[in-house]
Image (spheres, helix red, strand yellow):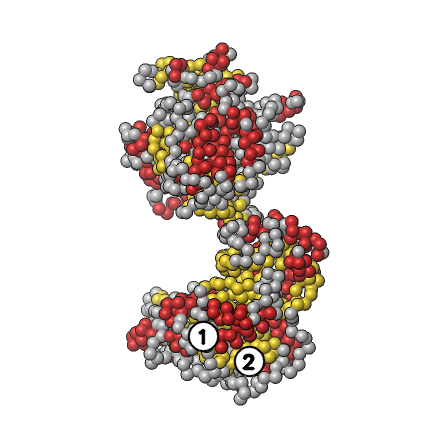
Amino acid sequence: MRTEHDILITPNRLHPKGGEVIDRTTTIRFTFDGVEYTAHPGDTVASALTAAGVQVLSRSFKYHRPRGLLCCSGHCPNCLVQIGDEPNVRACTRPVEAGMEVRAQNVWPSLNRDLLSLTQLGSRFMPVGFYYKTFIRPQKLWPLYEHTLRHIAGLGEVHIDTPLGEFDKQYLHTDVVVAGGGPAGIGAALAAAEAGAQVLLFDENPTLGGHLRFTVPMDSSSPPEASKNLPELLEAVNHQPNITVFTDTSVLGWYQDHWLCAVKGTRLFKIRTKSVIVATGAYEVPLIFDNNDLPGVMLGSAVQRLVHLFGVLPGKQVVIVTANEDGWDVAADLQSLGVNVGAIVEERESNACSSPYRDGLINAGVPVFYRHIIVEALGSNAVRGAKITRIDEHGEISPKTTQSLHCDLIVTSMGWTPATELAYMAGGKSEYNEERAEIIPVSTPPGIYVVGRASGTHALDSQIAEAQQIGTAAAAFVGFGEVDGLTAHSPDISKPRRTSERVCVPGNKKRFVCYCEDVTDEDVQTAIAEGYDSIELLKRYSTISMGPCQGAMCSMNTIHLCAHANSSTIQETGTTTARPPTTPVTLGALAGQNMEPVQTTPIHQWHLDHGADMMVAGFWLRPNHYGDPASEAMGVRERAGLIDVSPLGKLQLTGPGVPELLERIYTNQWKNLPVGRVRYGVMCNDEGVVLNDGVCAHLNDETWYMTTTSTGATPIFEWLQWWLQSGWGEGIHLTDLTDAYSAFNLAGPQSRAVLEKLTDRNLTNKAFPYMRVRSAKVADVPCRLLRIGFTGELSYEVHCPSAYALHIWEALMDAGREFGIAPFGVEAQRILRLEKAHIIVGQDTDAMSDPLSANMAWAVKLDKPDFLGKPSLMRISTEGPKQLLVGFKMVDSDVVPDEGLQIVEPDADGRLTITGWVTSSRFSPTLAEAIGLCWLPPELASQDGAPFTIRIDGNLVEARVHHDAFYDPDGERLRM
Amino acid sequence: MSTSKTPIKLTPLHSITQRLGVTFTEEQGWRIPEVYTTEEDEITAARERVVLADETPNGKLLLEGDHAESVLMDALDLDPLQVNEGRDGIYCLRNDLFFITTPPGREVRAQKKLTTVSAASEQFVTVTEVTHGRAEIRVIGPASQELLSKVCGLDFHPAAFPNETAKQSSLAKTTQLIIRRDIGELPAFSIIGTQSLGVYVWDTLIEAGREFGVVPIGRAALAELIKG
Ligand code: FES
Ligand code: FES
């Protein structure tokens, strides 16, 4: 029972009845623009607000006109609101939650008094396309235009500090997808499933049933059995193990090879199916007349949804405007609920009307105006009446016969347009059906089927029969049962529901074609007159059908208007191209869960536990430093340091063909490298550009162990694979051991003493000299030791099986304690290598750098028979490099230029010419001065000590070319 | 030379499991989680929902060469690789590349055998042990297919992915070898990929499986499940 209190706060709520989706035993509260309202669980935001008598839910995009519920099905822009941080929520489909804060969006200062609606006054100066023409001059004012336009137009607010939502994705695989869970979709799904196919059944509503949920038959003798049997249909679906149901889920698009995309809230589904049944129903088509966007002008199906699902009646006095039997159904439906049907305005002659409810309604005293049409909705913020007029024998309106009817709700039921976007995305073809005044699919590619209202079949009994046929055919197509040759379907037109092609009634006020973009009938005519007379051009120029509903409310009417203006047929006019998404989808849902792979070394936790500041290098997390990189660097110079270099690429090459391959991929000599030796090498591409560098160790007769840069591990592995598969693979096997081995660089004058404590291997300089490789047990674990030195000190790279990494690392740290060992990070390593003037590929080189220019001519043997990049390098060698990579020292030793800064040369007038750039720079703790590497013109780079200028914060600062390594240029410390 | 500690092998997931306060056991030189909560709870979770088990210690070998298959066959004839509890397997990744898994520790013998046979055949076949380079996570339970469908585009239905078969695929934007190794009636999938991505893949599976109540299980519960 409704109490008096209920009636006061929800005056539009009807008495309880069957079929409702709301729980009247519970009341929850929420706010809209700061005002508190009540709702029942199951209510949508819009149904609760309508129950409370709220009619204006939003303001239009351009003119800020008041807008209220139109479709109540999520297919128009009229109920877009902001809920919390989420903009553009459709109030008519979003369930209300306790405590929800709902706000009108894009209004100033408030929804009911939106001063931005004054833009309407200047609307005659803002015809279609006006911004293309107006806001291009003067160009410098564009920032101002943009700011103002963004303030006036736009949809909702996005807050940059909104916490990230939890979005994710799921892949689904099936035999048959049925998009749309109305009676036709359910029937087709059941038929396919019964034949043995796995079926996924999607519906955008919270429950299956489609229009059967809210179109209650009035006359028990006329409705087909199926409508009374919706519960049985749902029961059959529940008991069919081959069907999986996804409600609240919109199928957004069809892609090649039946790859579908659907969204349910924050989850995106990617679906691989063998067949698709499009059962997405139809959109009810609005009528275009003066003020047709006034709150209180609604589609018939919208009113029925509100009444039957939520027990809410959006008006007290209703005028129904129709041109087919649907309008009479709505009238009878409302009247049976005690609603005052003030009038039926029927476009047809009385004898054309065959509704079974006609006599009952007339007998009940409902005035019927045959051969009449509405010309204007009266009212300012909401409907207060309707102006109707007679249609003369030529089909034109007769202004002299205009009369006003009092009402607060205008319901239009003019017909339908099939929702066939998915079928068209898949390559389906359509034709205009004159009898129905609908564009319906006439052919579809193999495996794509259309059923129900989407195929132009409106009568329920026909839908059910058709669904059985289509479901069976789809199952047969995927291998369950016999293929019956069904390829396309002829719609059942024995019970036509639409008989008029009138989509627009002439007038002298605003008549909206596209609600989303605020495009009027007049705009369409203007655009066509300006030459945008093809439907695709008209769309682009006017932005019609490019709004949030993607043309659901306006496409069909636009085609009619365009055809009429061009004096052509609908068939000749054609349709615009359907593209995904069919309904708006959040970027969050498209992005899904944040899956950014992160690689960690086996001792990652040790680094964290010891205060490492981690940095991202490629996909790797590496310790940048442990607090003080300069001290870490000095520790290596003076004592011993240990760095985790596990991310280094580690490739094993085996087989007799390896030396030949190495000769081809490196720029230097390899065939002469004895077993037990290590050599540094540079790899180039065909253009002679440096790709990567590293060392390669000759382990035994047929086994080589190559290291690459950390970020180069995978690309170089794939690059080598490519060459091996392309003819260079004879007698070679390649294995990526990057993860199988962890690697630590033990560096510093005490490193030998540290390592000697953990191995029986003779580490003396004689037994294990510089650039050698040895196998040895370290802390009882078999390891590979490479005596190499990126840091410029005596050092050993210890490569151990990764599962022993922590054991080895801790053993080295323990052994080194008495020598003052400390871990060092990437930053200290960068300082140390810069002091030695070693380059880092990718930092000191770029996509144009060749090794001859990058000061590595010593590593290029142009007298080798052939290698990758040789022809290019020969040319560079002959012509001479255009730039050279060279070291520099700052004259003011405390000034460290940022990496990337320009090197400039002022002319006599003080104008600057860029002559080079800085690639690496650091303050050297060893030398106590600022040093770096840079690219310079050869004539400058070749003079040791030559001065040049670096532009730092607008100031010109002097530096000098420095040849050789800054530290230990003769490399004595490496060999000690 | 001085070392105070016995070398112990740790899986890439060790730090995660350590943080969870599990009890550890040792098997073939590996330290692995024995029990996370209780053995019973972990078995129930596996039978009713979905669980993750760290099976990194399983041996892994790569056998490469045009004649790898014949070497493999000869080696099997001589001494069939142990087929034990459904954990042994040979998977053809490419015509000339095979991936072999063994129970923990058995990889040493398998490698020796394959190397000997390969040498005797005088064919150019390379055997490489990659146990240390790969993390292996087993996803077990009735919801395992659904969980994996959130991170991988493969069809995990048994009709499309039968037991004891393997596929290489992208999983959570990483390359993984996925082997279906059901435990009795329970669907189960081994996810094998580079060890440096092990923590990321584990965390991603835990996150994706939250809605299904995913939990990790230790060696004890896994052994019980395998025993049936
Ligand atoms: S009224 Fe909500 S989308 Fe149309
Ligand atoms: S009414 Fe929505 S795009 Fe035109």
Work out whether A131 lies above or below B114.
above
Q: Residue at x 56, y 30 (%)?
A: A232
Which residue lies most toward the bottom here? A766
Quadrant of the rendered image containing residue A392: top left
Q: Label 2 belongs to which residue?
A: A775
Q: Taking the image as drawn, is residue A416 in sight?
A: yes
Q: Position of residue A49 (x, y in %)?
A: 57, 29
The image shows a total of numbered marks equal to 2
Which residue, as the protein is rendered here, is positioned at the far front? Answer: B77
Q: CA distance from mark 1 to mark 2?
A: 26 Å
Is residue A842 among what the camera can see? no
Disc 2 is attached to a residue of which chain?
A: A
Nearer to the camera, A229 or A756: A229
Where residue B123 is drawn, which disc sits there? Answer: 1
Chain of the residue under the numbered disc 1 shown in the image: B
B135 on left or right of A411: right
Residue shown at 46%/81% (left/top)? A701
Q: Amino acid at mark 2?
A: Ser
